[in-house]
Every structure is written in structure tokens, then in C-alpha cells.
Image (cartoon, helix red, strand yellow):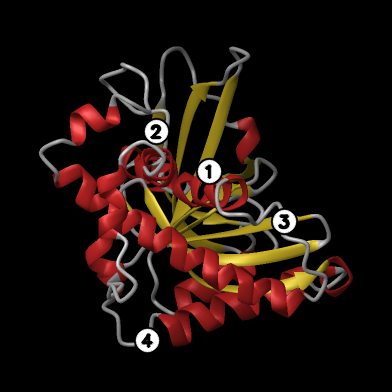
Amino acid sequence: MALDWTTEERQHLLVASLIVGRRAVPLYWEAYTSAELKGCQRGLEYAFVDEVCGQLLAGLARDRVLVTADRGFCDNEVLARLESWGVPFVLRLPAHVTVYLAQQWRKLGSLAMRRTTRRRTLGHLWCIQSKPRRYWLAQSRARNRKGRWEYWHLVSNRPLSACTMAQEYARRFGCEEGFRDAKRLLGVAQARIAEVQAWARMFAVVAAALLILTQLGTHLLRHPQHQPWLRQVRSRRRARSELSVVAVVCQLLDHVEVLWHRLLPHSKLNLEATL
């Protein structure tokens, strides 16, 4: 599950998205205006974490879920709340966070990796000097499009390897792709709804549409004709696709009439089975 904000003009959504593989569907969200967020964003995030962990995940075995979030969420209170709920997590830490390493407190940004090292486990360390708690930490890096090293400083309450932490955190970007599809393909960016709660209700329609399109994409990949259909809308790359499942289905609906027969008005939406 990925926690993240998405914004459209002065309206903001705090969203928990369910991610399996590269696919994501919004599961729970709350809407705010810019005025409501002013001076209160941290408190709203804490309450959101408690709502998700205490209500949404109630009765779910903790080994079936893992929470990820970007460095904007990662402070001592969020880590403590996730830990108190017993929820496994992999979050990205800002570079200015301090850890106790080699008998001294050091900023993560000062722990440079040498030569060709791409990932390393730092160990079970005291983290955040103001209110220290012990977590498992790791670093990962890769060159960005400008050729510069970009670091991920990752923290978890489970003894995961550096490679596993990086892989789990990378899955968070599925929610970013979901936001992009919602805005570009499903009308969120074009919506002109002034009342924030009405805007949040409209997002429920978008979430249902994402689920329907994801379900249709799952059926599509099992269809014996899926390869010829996919060649109509994507490039000839074999290693990966530059399109999300939702974008593929939206484009194929313009080319393959038979797919419309699967959009039944009384379909039962099974979130877990679909993902």
C-alpha cells in the first residue's frame, strides 16, 4: 500500500493506493482545500495513518501488507505510528536525517557510496537524533537522466536486504502512474468542481473506473488475440511497455470493438482478484 498526495489546483487528495505488481487502485482517500492544509498537514497525515491502519487494515494479517511512502511522509511520528500498529513499512528518508553510525550521529546525506556500489545495508541503527528509535536502514543509488547519482535512503521496521528494500520502495511509483491515468485519461484534471467533498465523491467514480479498466486489462492479457491487439497501441519494445495497463485498455477500446462486450453494467468488482 502506498501513501501519497495528489493535487489539482487548490484541491488536495491524500490517498492510500493498493499496489500489486505494477498496478494500483485507490483504496481510501480524504480531500482538503489549500486553506484546510495550512499549518495542519502533519496532523492530518497522522490521523490518516491511524485511520488506514486501525480501520482499513483491521483483521488483515500484517504479513500480507507493506506500507511505502515518499520522504515527505517520513518523520519520527509516522514511523512510530506504523510501528505501534505492527504494520511493516519501507519509507524513504530525507538526506538530512541523522543516524548513529561508527559511534557518532551522522546525516544520511554524508554517507556517500564508493566506486560501483549500488546498494548497501547500513544495519539496525538508531535513527533521528531528537527522538531516537532503532530501525533497519539501507541505501540505494542510480544515475538520473542528467547523469547524476540519485540516492534512496530507505528505512524499515523489518530486517530486509538493501535489494529488497529498493524493490519494495520502487513499487510505490505504481500510485504515481495511477494518478497520471486518473488525471489524463479519466477526467480528474478537467473536472471543475468547487466543493471539495463533491470533488472527493467524483474521485470515487474515477477509482471505480480504474478498477474496471484494470479488470478488463487482466482479461485482455489472457485473451489469445492479445499480442496482435497490443501491437496496435504500443511500441515494438519487448522488454517493457511504456504504457500502463489502464492506458493500453483506453486506447484499445478505440480500436477493438469486441472489448466493449466485456464492459457489463452488472459486473462484480473484486479488487483483490483483479489486481
Q: Is residue 24 visible?
A: yes
Mark 1 vs mark 3: in front: 3
Work out whether mark 4 precedes mark 1 in sequence or the reverse, and give the earlier one. 4
Along the line of sight, the residue nearer the viewer: 232 or 29: 232
Distance from disc 3 to disc 2, alpha carbons, whole Å, reads 34 Å
- Quarter of the image with the N terminus in it: bottom left
Q: Quadrant of residue 146?
A: top right
Q: CB atoms at circles 4 and 1 under 8 Å apart? A: no
Secondary structure under tag 1 reads strand
Q: Amino acid at mark 2?
A: Arg
Q: CB atoms at circles 4 and 2 under 8 Å apart? A: no
Secondary structure under tag 4 reads loop
Circle 1 sits on which residue? 101
Residue 79, horizontal then vertical, whole percent: 54, 66
Q: Amino acid at mark 1?
A: Leu
Circle 2 sits on which residue? 120
